Amino acid sequence: MSQGFTVLNKKKSLEKRINNLTCSKGSCLIRFFVSIVCSFYGYAVDAQPEYPLEGLDLSGDVATYFDEHLGLDNTLVTLGVYKENETVLGEGHPNFLSKYWQSGTIFYRGQQYQSLNLIYNVADDQLIIQHPNVKYSDQAILINQDQVEWFEIDGHYFRNYRDFNSPGFYEVIFSSDSFELLVKRQKVSSFKSSEIYFQSEDQYYLSRDTDLIPARKVSRFWKSDDRFKQELKIYVRENKIPSALKKCSIQELMAFSDYYNKLLLSKEVKGE
């Protein structure tokens, strides 16, 4: 898997073969075509590729040819819509954790990209990246949201749930075969004295398959499955877990969810 956007070995190999081609019958046209495609993919092409040209049919599926010979790991994350950087006057900001770029990892179009500068605009539920190929650029790019499988910022893991009634990015607090505890990070805006203000309104959910069960309080766990009511109540009391989920730390939620999952597994082992 490519780390970042380093493709020097394939680039050098590509250039070496391009230089070796002559303008024999049809090769000039191929050379011109290859140069255009490689320029589009970010290669500085003053040469020709180290790949067989027999399979390249200019009237056919050229994308498949280049995927096979250049590799899918060269998918450009910069293919998106340029977005204007937003300046917020007033309190707060529309982003997750910080108004500034944060280093993170995304899984996009079948490939993992590390150490990208990201902004997750929770008000619009949009993941935005900083252009990685232009030095000192602050250019924001709105990538294709549907092709983002997951991303991670500052230890927070978000997954793209497309099959939910309310599709979008949800932070995964806990995940098992039995259930998931998710958070939909949200911010709402309001205006005061011609300035915009943002306030967090996160919503917690228990998820089973594609069903989303709103969960404001920890009691939702045993209200949705009363088999473990007493065990869970004792755990909450002994570990001093806050009643409201939004007041719980991530560590408390993970530990409580893990305890609940072990109760579920114990019932399955016993065949109950």
Image (spheres, rainbow, N blue to C red):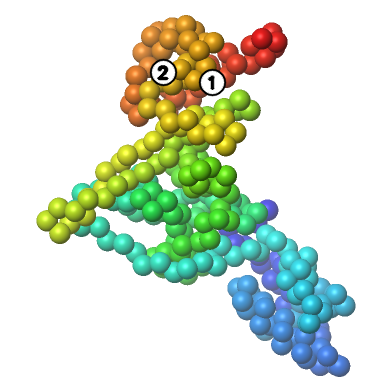
Q: Which mark is residue 140?
A: none
Please indicate, yes or no, whether residue 259 appears anywhere in the rendered image.
yes
Q: Are marks 1 and 2 in contact (CB under 8 Å)?
A: no
- The residue lying furthest to the left in this view is 193
Q: Compute the Cα span from label 1 to label 2.
A: 15 Å
Q: Which residue is mark 1?
A: 258
Q: Quadrant of the C terminus?
A: top right
> Residue at 43% of width from left, 31% of height from top?
214
> Residue at 77% of width from left, 85% of height from top?
30
**209 displayed left or right of 33:** left
Q: Which mark is residue 219?
A: 2
**Three-letter amino acid code at the position of disc 1:** Asp
Judge whether 132 appears above or below 34 on screen.
Answer: above
Question: Toward which corner of the image does residue 37 lie, by quadrant?
Answer: bottom right
Judge whether 204 appears above or below 115 on screen.
Answer: above
> Residue at 67% of width from left, 14% of height from top?
268
Q: For the residue labelled by badge 2, is the local secondary structure a helix, a strand or a loop?
A: loop
